[in-house]
Amino acid sequence: MRLVKLVQEQTASLVEHLTELRKRLIWVVVVLVVAMIGGFFVAKPILLYLMHAEPASSIISLNTFSPWDAIRLYMQFSFAIGLVVTLPFTLTQIWLFVKPGLMPHEQKATLRYIPGAVFLFLLGLSFAYFIIFPMAFYFTSSVTKSLSLTETYGAAQYFTFMFNILLPMALLFELPVVVMFLTKLRILNPIRLKKLRRYAYLILVVIATIVTPPDLISDILVAIPMILLYEISIVLSARIYKVQQERDKQWLGEADDGGLTGAK
């Protein structure tokens, strides 16, 4: 009977957690949709600016190959704007979901990660737009010219190419915050991160090779910041882990003192 009761309690707890997660996901989707609707109305000036900035300004003209291309552009930009606007809300919902399982001091500490995560996301977008994207574009353009092909770019294809570089890179810049958060939850620690270092380096170099032109300089320019992000993540994880170890020792010391006092 006790076993059955325990299973029922665990099942009920799991259902409650899944219900809570579903509720928060619904709110995230609702806010994303609202932000996308707002982004649809402010997408035009951003779109026009990017069409007249480098490297797009080096193209004679951007073309549309379908009546739907202009709508597609608006949808792409509204989604990108909605994603950026919704990011703080999404992170807050994640924090609220895990909050009940955290100690009071952990709740305050993890809440501070949200501004840092937003900053790193924007930093990743900037790095990708001003460094990686121009390199990738000019490289592909030079290959096109070397084959004596006429460069006729579709606006939708041009910006799809851009977003396929910007968004993944912005998410990769979240690595330090993700590592700190998982360390706070005791899922990761610096010891494990150091053991995984060689595999992490390999994965990061492969990603750098994929998102950049196939030349050594471009790969190095992207791989080095990503490896630095991983090393920064280890340092930040070590700081959190050290505080956790000290608190654990303090708690064990207090528990031992209490036991000795009780025994007397």
Image (spheres, rainbow, N blue to C red):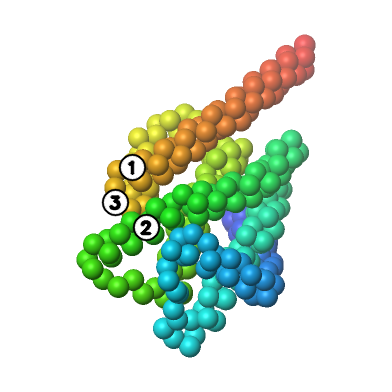
Q: Residue at 36% across / 74% down in the picture?
A: 152
Q: Which residue is mark 2?
A: 138
Residue at the outermost top position: 264
Q: Quadrant of the C terminus?
A: top right
Question: Residue 187 is drawn in which quadrant?
Answer: top right
Nearer the viewer's eye, disc 3 or disc 2?
Answer: 2
Q: Residue at 45% across / 81% down in the picture?
A: 64
What amino acid is labelled 2 in the image?
A: Tyr
Q: Is 206 displayed left or right of 165 in the figure?
A: left
| Distance between the alpha carbons at the discs numbered 1 and 3 | 9 Å
Q: Which one is nearer the viewer's eye here, 19 or 128? A: 128
- Image mark for residue 203: none
Nearer the viewer's eye, disc 2 or disc 1?
Answer: 2
Secondary structure of the residue carrying numbered label 3? loop
> Eyeballing the image, is 4 above or below 78?
above
- Image mark for residue 214: 3
Q: Which residue is mark 1?
A: 217
Q: Is 152 displayed left or right of 115 in the figure?
A: left
Is disc 2 in contact with disc 1, using a CB cutoff of under 8 Å?
no
Q: Residue at 57% across / 76% down in the picture?
A: 74
Q: Which one is nearer the viewer's eye here, 167 or 153? A: 153
The earlier-in-sequence mark between 3 and 2 is 2
Question: Residue 258 is drawn in which quadrant?
Answer: top right
Q: Position of residue 46 (x, y in %)?
A: 61, 67
Residue at the outermost left position: 147
Q: Position of residue 78 (x, y in %)?
A: 60, 71
| Distance between the alpha carbons at the discs numbered 2 and 1 | 14 Å
Q: Quadrant of the N terminus?
A: bottom right
What amino acid is labelled 3 in the image?
A: Pro
Query: Alpha-carbon neighbours of circle 3 within 10 Å: few (<14), some, or many (≥20)?
Result: some
Secondary structure of the residue carrying numbered label 2? helix
> Eyeballing the image, is 258 above or below 16?
above
